[in-house]
Image: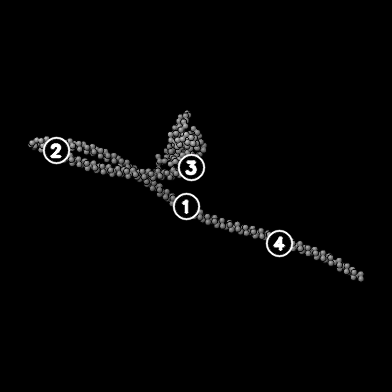
Amino acid sequence: MTTLAARRRRSIDFWPGFVDALSALLMVLVFLLMVFTLGQFVLSDALSGRDKALEKMSAELAELSRVLSMERAAKLQALSDVGELSASLGDTSRERDALRLRLDETSASLTQTSALLEGSRDEAARLAADIAALSELKRQLEAEVATRLAELETTRDRLTAQTELSAKSAAQVELLNRQLAALRAQLDEITAALDLQRAASEAKDLQIADLGRQLNLALANKVQELSRYRSNFFGRLREILGNREDVVVVGDRFIVPSELLFPSGSDALSPTAAIQLDRLAATLREVTAEIPSGIDWVLRIDGHTDRRPISTARFPSNWELSAARAIAIVKHLVAAGIPANRLAANGFGEFQPLDSGNSEAAFSRNRRIEIQLTNR
């Protein structure tokens, strides 16, 4: 009995421990499942982020490939454009050489035409002198013929009045008739020669007029050729001065306010003006290097002031101030390497105003330096 009770007690004590162990094992399994589930979630999130990053990188790679293709296409287009520009530049160079050759031929033709014109003018002067001499001779002969005719008529009247003509009178009448015929023949010859001289003179006048037209056309071509270089020079000069509104181009003149170059009442160039004139000289050398040798160009510097008087020991009037400013610019350009024979300085004082008003704005417009690239 005691043994059975002991077995029963041992049997009851073992089961709770087993249950506890089973519960603990179950909790461990649940914990492991939770850890596994959490790991799966974290791993899934990481893989999802990596997929998104890969997709983003793939898109960026595709964009880079597209940009690279565009760059390659642009590079090929640029190489094609460079080839076309090189070919165009070669054609332009050939055209420029052809134009220079034509200009040289035109200059030679112009020189020959001028020589022919001078010779034609001399010959026309000689023809005019011959015509004047022949006209005078004709007038004298006509006067002599008239005198002889009058004498003849008087003689005829006298002879007719006589009842009988003597042999001497008849011979005298015959002689007078022969002299009159000879004078008329000589007069006809002189008239014919005069007509020939007049025809030759008219032909020479036509030839001179034609040579004059050719000379004017050649001169117009020279002026047009110089105008192209003038426009290029004025464009670069405007860039040097900073594209200011008060710097203008009027016809073939480039107008610069005096305040940009000189202090008030002075002919001393400001430091900024000296730098700008150095750049102007460099630009002038570049532009004039392209001008053909047949064009005799000169750069005119004209000084102008307003009409308010000035009277100092150095500048007794505005004449001296305007001329001194123009000379100062010319001297600076000569020092910068521009040949002196290509420069001209002029002072006009206040006598060629752009604005006749009395306002400060009008005075400012009239105080100016004009630059003109023209034929000598």
Numbered circle sitting on residue 297: none
Q: Residues within 10 Å of mark 3 (few under 14, many from 20)?
A: some
Question: Magenta region: which residues?
Answer: 237-247
Where does the image place residue 13, in percent across and percent down from the top left? Answer: 86, 66
Q: Which residue is tagged 2?
A: 176
Q: Which residue is tagged 1?
A: 85
Q: Earlier in the sequence, mark 2 or mark 1?
A: 1
Tell me how far mark 1 sits from mark 3, CA to CA.
27 Å
Mark 1 touches mark 4? (CB < 8 Å): no
Q: Residue at point 24% right, 43% down?
A: 196
* 266 lies left or right of 132: right
238 within the magenta span: yes
Question: Which of the pair 147/128 is nearer the observer?
Answer: 147
Q: Residues within 10 Å of mark 4 (few under 14, many from 20)?
A: few
* Amino acid at pointer 4: Gln
Say if 357 sits above or below 3 in the image: above
Tell me how far mark 2 sits from mark 1, CA to CA.
94 Å
